[in-house]
Image (cartoon, rainbow, N blue to C red):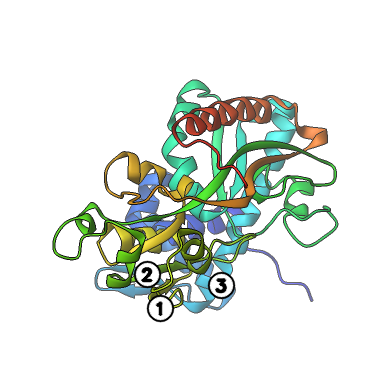
């Protein structure tokens, strides 16, 4: 016999409390009392027959059951929101969902996003950070399902730019460069030439992506033979690599685009002029059939302008 689902309102209260990990903050967002949130969560737990939160002396924490259910529940609410917006506004929907790799979203897109939201206050932007790739065909593994089901409107992809049934707008090409804290350019072990890297820790970005730049290739291009390209610290997150570099823990090899703001602000420096061109580039991808929808077209125009500004500050690399 099929069990009845809990009320949509109860699930919304759970999602909000789980997102904040706080009944009081959930109450503020939902404009109810913390007691009402606690009561609704307790009723939901009784209905489901599972405990969703650990009640701690200072706040709450999700149980395994609550943690495992949260992503699907959030996705479900996202789909409901998209469906209701379609019913209300058709092509004039407020919500624009942008899929991007977490590194690009955090280090390049999000810092520039206020200029878009300030200019188009009727459009709400949702950033969906994901490591999924845009496949050559929407029938292949990748984010094709998200496009088809309307879960994302556009994707910013690092690759070659040709995708079936999609419009592809090239944003910019990139190069990999060594970067470090300005502190490493001072003192007895100051970095002045590529050979000086033998006195410092190499920081490796092991994030899997197409045409991944490696220290071995950069060192060969720089003509350095006395530095072991495999030694050093390894990370599977660009954010962690850049954070370690800012803290002076070593020298990172990173895509310029991801370190550009930190370089401009003086938190990081590129000690050498030797740039390692990367064959892949950043592209804005949208379905051909929705490419001219207002919110998508406006975002395309905005991000192409931002890309143009970036290229003036960091010219695209050339291949020999």
Given residues 121 and 215, the one toward you in this image is 215
The vertical placement of 295 against 25, above or below, is: above
Q: Residue at x 46, y 47 (%)?
A: 256
- Residue beneath disc 3: 68
Within 10 angstroms of label 3, few (less than 14), some, or many (20 or more) residues? few
> Which residue is most to the left?
187
Q: Is residue 206 in view from this perspective?
A: no
Q: Could you tell me which residue is drawn at 46 percent across and 77 percent down? A: 230
Q: Are marks 1 and 3 in contact (CB under 8 Å)?
A: no
Label 3: which secondary element? helix
Q: Position of residue 127 (x, y in %)?
A: 54, 45
Q: CA distance from mark 1 to mark 3?
A: 37 Å
Q: Secondary structure at mark 1?
A: loop
Is the C-beta separation of discs 1 and 2 under 8 Å? yes
Image-quadrant location for residue 222 = bottom left
- At horizontal 41% and vertical 43% (from top left) the residue drawn is 260
Q: Residue at x 53, y 78 (%)?
A: 50
């Amino acid at each position: 016999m099929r069990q009845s689902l809990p009320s949509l309102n109860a699930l919304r209260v759970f999602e909000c409390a789980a997102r904040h990990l706080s009944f009081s903050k959930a109450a503020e967002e939902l404009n109810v009392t913390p007691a009402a949130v606690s009561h609704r969560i307790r009723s939901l737990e009784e209905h489901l027959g599972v405990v969703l939160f650990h009640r701690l002396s200072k706040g709450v924490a999700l149980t395994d059951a609550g943690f495992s259910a949260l992503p699907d529940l959030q996705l479900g609410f996202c789909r409901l929101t998209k469906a209701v917006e379609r019913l209300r506004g058709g092509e004039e929907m407020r919500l624009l969902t942008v899929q991007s790799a977490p590194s690009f979203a955090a280090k390049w897109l999000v810092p520039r996003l206020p200029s878009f939201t300030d200019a188009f206050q009727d459009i709400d932007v949702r950033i969906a950070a994901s490591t999924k790739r845009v496949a050559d065909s929407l029938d292949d593994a990748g984010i094709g399902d998200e496009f088809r089901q309307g879960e994302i409107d556009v994707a910013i992809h690092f690759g070659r730019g040709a995708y079936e049934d999609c419009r592809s707008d090239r944003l910019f090409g990139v190069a990999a460069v060594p970067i470090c804290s300005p502190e490493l350019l001072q003192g007895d072990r100051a970095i002045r030439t590529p050979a000086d890297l033998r006195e410092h820790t190499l920081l490796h970005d092991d994030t899997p992506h197409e045409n991944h730049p490696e220290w071995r290739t950069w060192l060969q291009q720089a003509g350095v033979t006395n530095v072991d390209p495999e030694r050093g610290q390894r990370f599977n997150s660009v954010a962690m690599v850049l954070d370690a570099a800012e803290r002076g823990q070593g020298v990172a090899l990173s895509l310029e685009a991801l370190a550009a703001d930190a370089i401009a602000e003086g938190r990081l420096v590129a000690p050498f002029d030797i740039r390692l061109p990367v064959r892949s580039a950043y592209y804005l991808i949208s379905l051909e059939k929705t490419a001219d929808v207002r919110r998508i077209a406006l975002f395309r125009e905005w991000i192409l302008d931002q890309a143009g500004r970036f290229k003036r500050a960091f010219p695209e690399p050339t291949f020999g």
